[in-house]
Image (tube, rainbow, N blue to C red):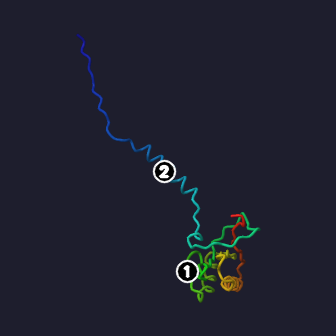
């Protein structure tokens, strides 16, 4: 009689996690690429609406925000009113920029926005106002 050798196959218990890691990596990249990181949204500022709001804005790193209470933020860092002028000058020199984006809450008093415009002009900065589309 011929002997046949049989080898028993062991069942592998467990889950192969390599395909799961691949899928999770793709999902993480998808979510990171589709997220909009917006520092202004974290400050709770709602810009005023304008019919002529620009769709494509140039990216500028020097952003001054004024919340509804009149608090000033330069590049998302709170700055007291008495230090706005020196901070604007220092940050503009560090970033080698001549433009400033002013983001003011729609309910902020005009005196705060005029103060920022005045300080920016004293430092020779070109000012852009950030608005939102009137139909949003």
Residue at point 66% right, 72% down? Answer: 47
Q: Position of residue 29 (x, y in %)?
A: 53, 53
Label 2's element?
helix
Residue 50 drawn above or below residue 118: above
Identify the image quadrant of residue 79: bottom right
Of residue 131 and residue 62, the one placed in the foreground of this image is 131
Q: What x and y, as percent, mark residue 73?
A: 59, 79
Q: Position of residue 7 (x, y in %)?
A: 27, 25
Foreground tag (1 vs 2): 1
User: In terms of depth relative to the viewer, which is nearer, 57 or 112?
Assistant: 112
In the rendered image, the residue lying farthest to the bottom is 82
In the picture, measured across the screen, residue 133 lies left or right of residue 45, that is: right
Residue 6 rendering spot, x and y as whole percentages: 27, 22
Query: Where does label 1 land, which residue?
Result: 78
Q: Quadrant of residue 4?
A: top left
Outermost residue on the right side: it is 52
The quarter of the picture where the C terminus appears is bottom right
Task: Please tell me which residue is depicted at 48% across the width and 50% down the height of the picture.
Answer: 25
Give the tally of numbered discs.
Answer: 2
Per the model, the C-alpha gap separating discs 1 and 2 is 36 Å
Label annotation for residue 86: none
Q: Quadrant of the N terminus?
A: top left
Q: Which residue is mark 2?
A: 25
């Amino acid at each position: 009689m011929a002997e046949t050798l049989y080898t028993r196959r062991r069942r592998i218990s467990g889950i192969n996690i390599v395909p799961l890691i691949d899928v999770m990596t793709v999902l993480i990249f998808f979510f990171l690429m589709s997220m909009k990181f917006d520092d202004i949204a974290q400050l709770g500022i709602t810009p005023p609406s304008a019919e002529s709001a620009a769709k494509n804005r140039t990216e500028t790193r020097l952003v001054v925000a004024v919340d509804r209470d009149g608090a000033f933020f330069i590049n998302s860092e709170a700055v007291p009113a008495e230090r706005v002028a020196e901070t604007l000058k220092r940050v503009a020199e560090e970033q080698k920029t001549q433009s400033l984006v002013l983001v003011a809450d729609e309910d902020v008093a005009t005196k705060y926005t005029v103060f920022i415009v005045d300080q920016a002009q004293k430092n020779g900065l070109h000012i852009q106002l950030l608005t939102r589309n009137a139909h949003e």
